[in-house]
Image (cartoon, rainbow, N blue to C red):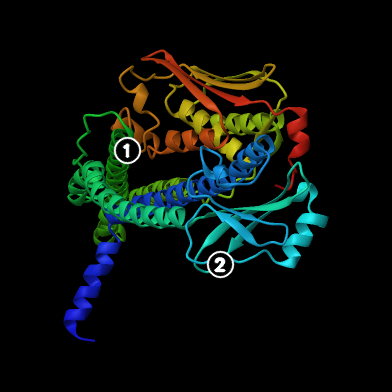
Amino acid sequence: MSPAIKGWLRKLQKFNQSLSVKLTFMYGGMMFLILIFTAFLAIGSVHYLLMRQLQFDVRMSARQTVFYLDHHGQVDASIFQGQNVLTYVNLVVYNDKGRPILDNIARYEPGEPLTPGQLRQLNETDPDGAHFEIIDTENELTYRYLKRWESADGKVYYLQFIRGAQRERFFIELLIRQILVTVLASLGVTILAGVVLTNKVLAPLRAMKEPLKHIEVNEMGYRIPLPESRDEQYELAVTINRTLDRIEHGVAQQRQFVSDASHELRTPITVINGYTDLLIRWGAQDPETLSESLAAIQAETEYMRQLIEHLLFIARASAGELNIRLRPLETSEIVREVWNGLQIADRQGPHHELYLAANESALIEADDALFKQLLRIFLDNAVKYTPEGRRIMLSATATDAQYIVAIMDEGVGISEKDLPNIFTRFYRVDSSRTKATGGTGLGLAIARDIIDMHHASIEVTSELGSGTTFTITFPLLSEEGSADISPEE
């Protein structure tokens, strides 16, 4: 195949893929089908009405002629006068032998006589001596009505009324040609109008395409201009712009997350590298340096382990790859287990006043491991940021439809400007203080993910220097719901 033909075919394929072309052909095709259907309906209706009129003309002529003969009493040329026989209806009168004697159309030769079969049918078979038939030949459609009439003196005559459909057939053929020409002309006008209308309708969509061409990962600021008319295209532009806003926000968060994670990992690696160099130079000769370096390396390694675990948890949660087993969970035993672990750990470090204010039994739909992790995150935070000797209190109560867990402390508190950001990954109210406590800046972000996985909600109230209260609300699991959930799920 020559390159010219290949290029032409590629252009044709590209042309066929155009939305405006598809809409135009679709619109034109629909209009063509509608026009063709309308044309067939119109032609069929006209044909039906004309044929009915032909039949009516024949029967009406027969009725009026018989009425005239009944009053006139004899057969003569006067039956062709007046309105007895309608226009274009041919009346032939036959004697009792079936021979034509009168004809309202001048002829050079007499017409064909009636056949014996026709005479027998009129005299013996058909009621009232009348017979109607439609004769359909290749060249002509003819309506014929035969009527037997008997005069007062006993003479028998046969009346034949004939109406041909030549004029009507010619009219229908002319009508078909005219309608066909009209349909083709209308189709052409429809396609041209479709091209103009589709180009006008799709113009805003083409305008939307230009800004989208410039959007890159590093260039997310382009937005689609909104059309003046508030129609579907306006709603589409608004939806796309909002989607771009969310994508831009997500990309910014991803960049910030990667940057923060890199920074968090770089710091302990730098510390470990520094202490490793110190060990290489002085560790063998100085036991104190050796002990300090090993302790620092162990602490930074533990910090990196926690950080990597938290990053993996967040990555799996974001990708929906966590193996979550939601099932009916009785809460009081788990709350008691976590609280006992907190008391044991607190005895080994700075001591606080620990109070388990309430531990009511409740049935919720939860993953037991994640529920434990959630409680530990908030209790560990309370321990880290509450000075020694101050109070930490846990309360777990159940209402008619909710299970409420409240963790209260008398710690350093959180300022009002920082409260909206505490669940943001790597956000720290005080970086130096958080680093000193061993935090990664991901605990509350993980807690928020766990809360969302359990369709729960959280409220935070805090005051600088007075403490913080986290209130988590779970929906209670009804007895019907617990019966529907298998423990193996």
| Quadrant occupied by the N terminus | bottom left
**Cβ–Cβ under 8 Å for marks 1 and 2:** no
Q: Judging from the image, what secondary structure is the residue with disc 1 in?
A: helix
Describe residue 321's horizontal placement relative to residue 289 as left or right.
right
> Circle 1 is placed at which residue position?
236
Q: Quadrant of residue 64?
A: top right
163 over 17 or under it: above or below: above
In this picture, residue 209 sits left or right of residue 326: left
Taking depth in this image into account, of 193 and 325 the one nearest to the observer is 193
Compared to residue 9, the image places residue 23 above or below, namely above
Left or right relative to 101: residue 385: left
* Callout 2 secondary element: loop
Real-space Cα separation, disc 1 to disc 2, in angstroms: 64 Å
Q: Which residue type does callout 1 highlight?
A: Leu
Pinpoint residue 193: horizontal percent, then vertical percent: 25, 46
Residue at image point 48% right, 62% down: 107
Q: Which residue is more in the foreground, 40 or 354?
A: 40
- Observer-side mark, 1 or 2, equals 2
Q: Earlier in the sequence, mark 1 or mark 2?
A: 2
- Would you place residue 390 above or below residue 296 in this image? above
Classify 10 Å Cα crowding around label 1: few (below 14), some (14-19), many (20 and above): some
Q: Which residue is disc 2 drawn over? A: 137
Instruction: Mark yes or no: residue 282 visible.
Output: yes
Name which residue type carries label 2. Answer: Thr
Q: Residue furthest right?
A: 124
User: Relative to 485, is 172 above or below?
Assistant: below
Q: In the image, residue 252 lies at what x, y percent? A: 27, 42
